[in-house]
Image (cartoon, helix red, strand yellow):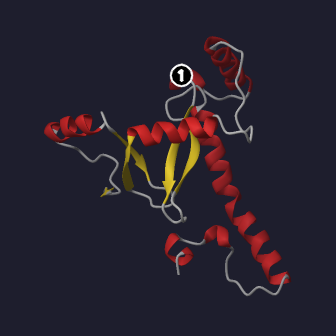
Amino acid sequence: MVQTSSDSSLSVPLGDLDHLKILQWSLVITYMYKCSNNFLFVCKKFYVSSVFSELNSPVGTYVVSNLAQSDILKFHLSFNKAHNFNGVKCGPCLLFLCAVWKFHKYPIKPRFICAASSTSLTDVSKWLCSFFKAMFPAVNDIWVSKLKKADVPCVSSWISMTLQEWWR
């Protein structure tokens, strides 16, 4: 596990970048869930098998589309235009599935997320994030109210707990 600084403009020497590229032949470098600024090195074969297992799960979370990628991207473009999102600047690529590992769970298991960085729906994703951040205080207040009505003493809901509070 490698911990980074909070400085997003962190520069890495070229020699180190070469070493990271070599590591990426057999490892996937991913984030740890609920541990900001921490990275995890996962065996690439294990990572890929975990993603395929998730995609082929009998639960039916994912549905195969019969549309061509170009048709899906056209739909995204029209959606972006209709809702005043500027998806054109983000690039003509689809979102992709990735896994981050939950170290706070036992056994450790992956959490699958749909990554939207530099895709046709990046602006939609950014808007949704800002919307949910704005809604957070109201949702927290609703949970606190519900917990107090159930005679559960609390100052804040589980939603606002930090990782350190969660592990106490």
Q: Is residue 10 left or right of residue 111?
A: left
Q: Judge by depth and name the residue closer to the eye, 135 or 151.
A: 151
Where is residue 133 shown, x and y percent of the image? 63, 55
Q: How many marks?
A: 1
Crowdedness near tag 1: few (<14), some (14–19) or many (≥20) residues, C-alpha within 10 Å: some
Where is residue 52 shown, x and y percent of the image? 56, 35
Which residue is rendered at x = 46% and y = 41% of the image?
47
Q: Residue furthest left?
A: 15
Res. 115 visible in picture: no
Where is residue 9 shown, x and y percent of the image? 30, 46
Give above or below for 101 relative to 121.
below
Q: Judge by depth and name the residue closer to the eye, 29 or 136.
A: 29
Res. 88 visible in picture: yes
Picture quadrant where residue 106 is located:
bottom right
Which residue is rendered at x = 38% and y = 52% of the image?
40
Q: Residue furthest right?
A: 149
Which residue is rendered at x = 60% and y = 26% of the image?
86
Picture quadrant where residue 12 is located:
top left
Picture quadrant where residue 141 is located:
bottom right
Q: Judge by depth and name the residue closer to the eye, 1 or 49.
A: 49
Give above or below for 148 relative to 49.
below
Q: Secondary structure at mark 1?
A: loop
Give above or below for 100 relative to 34.
above
Which residue is rendered at x = 84% and y = 82% of the image?
150
Q: Quadrant of the N terminus?
A: bottom left
Give the labeled residue for mark 1.
93
Give above or below for 146 relative to 84.
below
Q: Amino acid at mark 1?
A: Cys
Where is residue 95 shown, x and y percent of the image? 57, 30
